Image (cartoon, grey):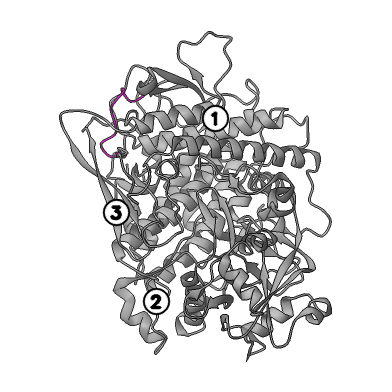
Amino acid sequence: MVPPQERRVGHHEDLIHRSDAQPSEPLTSCELSEPPGQQPPTDQPGVLSPGPVTPAAAAPDPLQRRDPGAAADAAAAENLLRCWVRETGLARPRNGVLRVPLPASGTALLVSVRHWSPAGLHRFDPPRLAGAPEDAAPLDAVCLAALLGREAAHGTGVTGAGDREASCRTEAHGRNGAHVAQEHKNVSVESNVLGRQGPTTTDGTLAPGSVPERGRAPEPESTSARGDAPVLEGAALVGRVADSVQRTARFLADRRTHPGPPPGTGPFLDGEQALLFGHPLHPTPKSREGLSETEERMYSPELRGSFPLHWMAVHPSVLSCDSAWTDRGKPVPAPDLARRLGGGRELAERLPGDCVPLPLHPWQAGEVRRDAAVRALLDAGLLHDLGQSGGHWHPTSSVRTVFRQDSPAMLKLSLGVRITNSRRDNLRKELLRGIEVHRLLRGGIGAAWRAAHPGFDVVRDPAWLGVDVPGEGRLHGFDTVIRHNPFGAGEDAVCLAGLTAPVPGPRGVPGPPRSRLGALVTALAQRTGRSPGAVATEWFLRYLDVVVRPVLWLDAHAGIALEAHQQNTLVLLDTHGWPRGGRYRDNQGYYFRASHRDALTRRLPGAELGVASDTFVADDVTDERFAYYLGINNVFGLVGAFGSQQLADERLLFAAFRRFLEHAAREEPASGLPALLLETPVLRCKANLLTRLHGLDELVGPVDSQSVYVALDNPLVP
């Protein structure tokens, strides 16, 4: 018998029981349809069904290859293929082999499918060139990146050519709601199953030059949205893929040699260090341009690095800061916080006069000293370089945010390394945004939110430090966020991306790499005597209730949408591994709805809310971003993780998510997201590969902080 406290999702019991079905009794699409009057599409004869294709015993998982370099390369190739399938609308194949046309190169790729995922987290074997000899080696990730970049550069394989055109817009929105849009040509085509649209060849792929009607994909143009650089940076993509592969190989080699965390590593930090392969739908998830191998050892969470901080003493005349931090109800100014975090007597003895210590990432300290404005302040005695001091801090999954178990604060540091697409320098408006949200949530709306959902909150960013040049403004590279550290040593709080991340076992251990999520589901199934599928379904339902529902509440009641992608979402687990609550982190990712401007402004009178922080965003842009980050990245990604790791049937989980959204849409007031996800056949989806090929830095300014968005068929809509 399962203890009563573990069965709190009664109105979903039918779905949980259904997941106890034997694998030999797959659920049909009709069984998964929630509204009885609807007739969703069923699988076409001869078309590859969603789910595992290649039995694990028959073909070793490429991510578990003995050579870490080969495993890293296979992972990178899978990422590129997943991105290409999503961003070009390739159809589900009719058999176990996906054909990817490469008309610009006069050939095609043949890719064995290990798992076809309705959520988009497909598993593939390394690709081969069509027509190549049987003994020819598969393509490596660098070669694959070059071929895909060539297709995009020539406008083939990405969009269609035909007489009938339909409008498709690939939009790149700035933070202020302004956007750049490019018009693209697409052909109208017939539909096939599972929400994927497109005319198919005999093997089930899109015919060369064809694109989906619902899942339209963008046609790159000859100039970028920025207007000063080529749209397609194929060579840069190849270089960053190579960099990502090499770093991933080193991460895998180290983790296979040292699989267990060092003594004293708590669950939070262990989860931050688990993302060895990175974002499964990013072409260069571990690219870190500017970081040497020696620096990588110290500064990488994947290598469990740690380091002391570098400190600058800042004269009050050039210090810029703010604080809403309190200690037992008493305000704590930002300079006092900085002194507390400075590491004690050693730093205090080196601190000149009334200067304030400001922490820097050691890599950033070397970078800023090359700035002429910094050198001028040093020469004038307004800045003093104090060097490294204090105990070691640990980088979290973002690389630039650092953590110490014994510290009341984490520090989000500026870091000019280009990580994936962007240099990770903090922007002043983000610092202002974090403190605004903290002040808002200290008021009535925060109290109401916590009363409705006591297990969920935002990890607050209530203080910051920076340097301003007299008469010129912010000095680049110094802005630092002081973030609450709410996690005690025994609290099991782990980011969702770390929870779902596959981690290879020790060298020589057979089978696919396992995630902590997989280990939890297996352990819960053994403890409760239920099937892994039933446990996974209940785990998912609990997650929706304690993590997703509170995020929807904040949007509905306050008009604040959170950019709650998997890396920004922390799951609080109980002693058995069930979700019991959650946290959201990231001062970049708050969207104040323009329609709630007056109501939100009244909550902080006199504060000019959202002006300098650039936080109010048009509702339509907010809807698009909210649907992507919470809907596609977070929940669809979790569904895909369950499916690709063979823990649950993705179709069953999508049915559960539909039911959850139907209940959420009936609440009063209700967020608009549930209805949008339930009723919109085509969603706007961030295209990480095309964003990279357009040379966009997603975090810089209202023009350059742009991402390419493409249309994606919605698996929730039959």
Q: How many marks?
A: 3
Quadrant in which the C terminus is drawn: top left
Of residues 438 and 559, the one drawn nearer to the viewer in this rendering: 438
Q: Position of residue 185 (x, y in %)?
A: 22, 37
Which residue is label 1 attached to? 142
Task: Kindly identify the amino acid type of the residue bearing the numbered disc 3.
Answer: Val
- In the rendered structure, the answer to whether residue 254 lies left or right of residue 62 reads right
Could you say whether the residue bearing mark 1 is in a helix, strand or loop? Answer: helix
Frontmost residue, 235 versus 639: 235
Q: Quadrant of residue 502?
A: top right
Quadrant in the picture for residue 389: bottom right
On screen, residue 98 versus residue 380, left or right, reads left
Describe residue 469's horizontal placement relative to residue 623 as left or right: right
Looking at the image, tell me whether mark 2 or mark 1 is earlier in sequence order. 1
- Residue beneath the point at 38% across and 29% down: 151
Tell me if residue 4 can be seen.
no
How far separated are the C-alphas under marks 3 and 1?
30 Å
Closer to the N terminus: mark 3 or mark 1?
1
Magenta-drawn segment = 205-216
Determine the main secondary structure of the stretch shown in magenta: loop
* Position above or below: 520 against 505: below
Residue at (61, 49) in percent of width and height: 290
Mark 2, residue position: 610
* Kind of residue at badge 1: Val
Task: Please give the residue where the numbered disc 3 appears in the rendered image.
Answer: 180
SS under mark 2? loop
State left or right for residue 58 relative to residue 183. Answer: right
Q: Nearer the viewer, residue 301 or 451?
A: 301
